[in-house]
């Protein structure tokens, strides 16, 4: 009997699961499955898992547990989210989200083949999958209006769509991958840059919320955007901004805050003459882990213990709803503590406009489902390697679960409620 | 300033500004040119002093009061390097301690060094003798303390990396033992690969040691780690010359290849390549790789520890990522108890990994091994591992003194 490898669907959005099966194997034979991806810069990512065929010579990843390799247990999408770069510091990032997918090759080998021989050995069987960042018909529009710089993604189809602003971390540039996916799920999403992009300052000295207000108004004015409110999906430093937008701008009705602070970080915020100072940072509280990676999650503890409430962003003034997403193993920011303090502040003020999702084992960089865990990066301005945290399997589970919750949350608060009356 | 590598160093800084924040950094270059470094951030007290025996580090490679933290938290600049002294007689490790006037957390230090001190860490003491051994089949190095002796004899066995590792043997000799660092493969004319364990080779080594005029009779000790501990336990079971055995993170059964002693052959329990796991760093975790010695199909491979005449000390790192040492030690002790023996004892160290070495040895996260294409993950949380090394070394010396010294009076 011929060995066959099937995967359904072979072409899909990167947040869609794939059902992988191998058939025609000798009963109970142990095989190794390898996934390989080459990103647009030529960086290679690999993952491996060992499976045992059942009595009829089949391996069904939806049922069979991986015995070893990059993950263990039943994880149908494990080969995707456990992809590891050949260089530990490389992050998987799609630059062109429109015209090309990531190609993932799945290959099957005998288990007794040493892993080091895999690159030079022909697999018994293989297939290639396409993983797209946009659904067909999604439109991408470069935005350069007024001060705003970014990219607007419009869902396919006619009509108007709820508007969302997508804010990434403070590393600068413009990351479009999440915005394009949100658009593929029916949200008109503006991936908004705020530093080190086109003519925006490379190292801003302050965060001016009027820039973000301009972006909100731009979005609401757009003929394809359904008002009256907009949503925000934001992470890390982006979530500091997202929180401040929710506080000051009443058009913000739904805000997702992923691993963000409840205070200002590094540079002051200004809004119409009002200045919010950043919380002092204590460099001596940096921890270096066993691999030599820098962990910053304690660097605000001294200031937080000594600070008065004025340093905390006045979250109780926000009128919209909040979804807090926390990776408990975040090694960059003490996200769990900050979200807890923010929600306690809401509770003390009699507000219940929030939901907190806290994920054990998840790290700082929570992204779309099946994204590989990036555990560390080198930030070009600093000579060190930053540990983001997260354990591979729990982080993957958190990404899958939180993405569903994010979409549900945005739909709930941005789509008009249709009520029928008897 | 100049001490044995297992001795603590008292580091103090004076003359700082009150409450000044400083960085203390340690660096060393090993014999292959690999750089290892560590740092911690300290705050001087009101009179501008800091004393590492009392002052806590705020951050860096460790946090809290750790007088020897700069030593055991040394990390390689190049990933997966292990710090291992090759020449234990003629040179020390030179560790440079640098003081900087601020919190230096980046990899590139642009600040001026405020003060600097070089500390020597020796693996042998004055008068210690090293004798290259090439007698019969035996290959290794014998370390003799100064003086006439006779001294209690110990055989030192390292693990699956092969070759000859001498630094623990030389340190033990500096503490008064005649120690034979014994190679068993990948050294001189020994086989380059380990394909079987010939216990007669180890018996020959034991007899050679006992025959030396400076070595006490009638019994010797064995200190062994990892694969070496599997062998060490076999020696304890079958060789009456062995009266005291230290087993560090080893197994209680024969794995991978057979053990042979005279007419007896013990076949190995199989290993399962599909059970290896890859760590986020790309290193391989072999903890689940070996078959189960509790399985009734594997009983012929389990070492008959009830036959051991001497005493056995099991030293276990609970966070060992290379093997399930805790389970192996527990089964061995269970086996002793079920035969009415009480000559075994376990020291279990939470947070410690596979490579439990003499005190202040830096924790090695993972390192290459010639039998595998990827580095092996050893496990261990740095501070807990360091504490385990410090504590277990004292226990090792106590154990050998208790069971090997002739002057012990019998009631």
Image: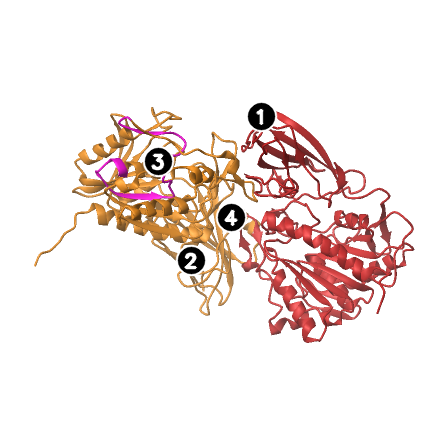
For label 2, the SS is loop
Tell me whether circle 4 and circle 1 mark residues in contact (CB < 8 Å).
no
Q: Is residue B313 above or below residue A300?
A: below
Q: Nearer the viewer, mark 3 or mark 2?
A: 3
Q: What percent of the width, then of the height, locates residue B403?
A: 80, 62
- In space, the residues marked 4 and 1 are separated at their CA atoms by 33 Å
Q: Nearer the viewer, mark 1 or mark 2?
A: 1
Q: Callout 3: few (<14), some (14-19), or many (20+) C-alpha neighbours within 10 Å?
A: few
For label 3, the SS is helix
Whether residue B271 is visible to the viewer of this picture, yes or no, is yes
Q: Find disc 1 in the rendering and name its residue.
A: B111
| Mark 3 and mark 1 on one chain | no
Q: Quadrant of residue B55?
A: top right
The answer to which of marks 4 and 1 sits earlier in the sequence is 1
Q: Is residue A269 above or below residue A22?
A: above
**Residue range highlighted in magenta:** A246-273
| Mark 1 and mark 2 on one chain | no
Subunit of label 4 = B
**Near-viewer residue (B69 or A213):** B69
Side of B40 where A325 appears, left or right: left
Chain shown orange: that is: A
Q: Find disc 4 in the rendering and name its residue.
A: B280
């Amino acid at each position: 009997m011929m060995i066959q490898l099937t995967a359904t669907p072979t072409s899909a959005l990167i947040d869609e699961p794939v059902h992988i099966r191998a058939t025609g194997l000798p009963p109970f034979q142990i095989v190794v499955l390898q996934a390989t991806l080459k990103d647009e810069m030529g960086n290679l990512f690999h993952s491996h898992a060992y499976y045992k065929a059942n009595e009829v010579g089949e391996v069904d990843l939806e049922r069979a547990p991986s015995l070893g390799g990059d993950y263990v247990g039943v994880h149908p999408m494990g080969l995707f989210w456990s992809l590891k770069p050949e260089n530990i510091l490389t992050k998987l990032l799609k630059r062109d989200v429109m015209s090309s997918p990531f190609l993932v090759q799945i290959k099957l080998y005998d288990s007794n083949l040493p892993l080091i021989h895999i690159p030079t050995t022909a697999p018994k069987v293989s297939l290639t999958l396409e993983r797209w960042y946009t659904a067909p018909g999604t439109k991408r529009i470069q935005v350069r209006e007024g001060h705003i710089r970014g990219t607007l993604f419009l869902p396919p189809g006619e009509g108007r769509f709820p508007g969302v602003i997508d804010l990434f971390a403070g590393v600068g540039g413009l990351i479009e991958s999440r915005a394009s996916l949100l658009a593929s799920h029916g949200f008109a999403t503006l991936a908004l840059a705020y530093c080190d992009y086109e003519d925006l300052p490379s190292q801003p000295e302050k965060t001016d919320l009027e820039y973000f207000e301009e972006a909100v108004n731009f979005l609401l004015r757009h003929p394809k955007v359904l008002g009256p409110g907009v949503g925000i999906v934001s992470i890390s430093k982006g979530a500091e901004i997202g929180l401040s937008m929710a506080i000051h701008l009443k058009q913000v009705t739904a805000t997702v805050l992923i691993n963000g602070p409840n205070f200002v970080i590094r540079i002051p915020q200004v809004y119409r003459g009002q200045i919010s100072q950043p919380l002092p940072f204590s460099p001596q509280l940096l921890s270096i882990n066993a691999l030599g990676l820098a962990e910053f999650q304690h660097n605000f503890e001294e200031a937080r213990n000594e600070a008065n409430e004025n340093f905390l962003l006045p979250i109780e003034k926000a009128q919209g709803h909040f979804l807090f997403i926390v990776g408990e193993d975040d090694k960059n920011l003490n996200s769990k503590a900050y979200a807890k303090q923010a929600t306690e502040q809401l509770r003390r003020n009699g507000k219940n406009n929030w939901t907190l999702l806290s994920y054990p084992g998840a790290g700082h960089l929570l992204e779309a489902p099946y994204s590989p865990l990036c555990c560390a990066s080198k930030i070009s301005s600093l000579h060190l390697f930053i540990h983001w945290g997260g354990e591979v399997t729990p982080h993957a589970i958190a990404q899958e679960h939180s993405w569903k919750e994010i979409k549900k949350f945005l739909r709930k608060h941005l789509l008009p409620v249709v009520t029928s009356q008897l | 300033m100049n001490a044995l590598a297992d001795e603590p160093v008292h580091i103090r800084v004076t003359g700082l500004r009150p409450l000044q924040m400083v960085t203390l950094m340690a660096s060393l270059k090993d014999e292959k040119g690999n750089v290892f470094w560590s740092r911690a951030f300290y705050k001087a007290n009101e009179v501008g002093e800091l004393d590492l025996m009392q002052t806590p580090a705020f951050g860096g490679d460790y946090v809290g009061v750790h007088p020897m933290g700069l030593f055991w938290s040394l990390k390689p600049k190049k990933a997966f390097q292990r710090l291992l002294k090759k020449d234990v007689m003629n040179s020390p490790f030179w560790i440079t301690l640098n003081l900087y006037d601020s919190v230096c957390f980046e990899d590139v230090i642009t600040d001026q060094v405020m003060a600097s001190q070089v500390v020597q860490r020796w693996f042998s003491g004055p008068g210690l003798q090293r004798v290259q051994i090439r007698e019969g089949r035996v290959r290794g190095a014998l370390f003799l303390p100064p003086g006439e002796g006779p001294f209690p004899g110990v055989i030192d066995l390292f693990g699956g990396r092969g070759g000859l590792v001498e630094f623990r043997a030389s340190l033990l000799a500096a503490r008064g033992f005649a120690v034979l660092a014994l190679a068993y493969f990948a050294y001189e004319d020994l086989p380059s690969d380990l394909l079987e364990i010939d216990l007669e080779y180890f018996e020959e080594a034991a007899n050679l040691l006992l025959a030396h005029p400076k070595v006490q009779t009638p019994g010797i000790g064995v200190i062994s780690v990892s694969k070496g501990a599997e062998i060490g336990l076999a020696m304890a079971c079958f060789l009456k010359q062995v009266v005291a055995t230290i087993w560090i993170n080893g197994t209680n059964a024969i794995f991978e290849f057979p053990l042979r002693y005279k007419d007896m052959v013990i076949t190995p329990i199989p290993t399962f390549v599909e059970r290896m796991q890859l760590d986020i760093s790309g290193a391989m975790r072999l903890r689940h790789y070996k078959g189960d010695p509790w399985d009734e199909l594997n009983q012929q491979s389990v070492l008959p520890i009830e036959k051991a005449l001497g005493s056995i000390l099991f030293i276990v790192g609970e966070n060992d990522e290379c093997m399930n040492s805790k389970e192996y030690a527990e089964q061995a002790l269970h086996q002793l108890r079920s035969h009415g023996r009480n000559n075994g004892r376990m020291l279990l160290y939470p947070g410690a990994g596979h490579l439990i070495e003499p005190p202040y040895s830096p924790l090695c996260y993972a390192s290459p091994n010639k039998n595998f294409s990827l580095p092996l993950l050893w496990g261990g949380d740095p501070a807990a591992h360091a504490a385990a090394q410090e504590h277990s070394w004292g226990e090792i010396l106590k154990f050998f003194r208790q069971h090997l010294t002739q002057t012990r009076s019998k009631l």
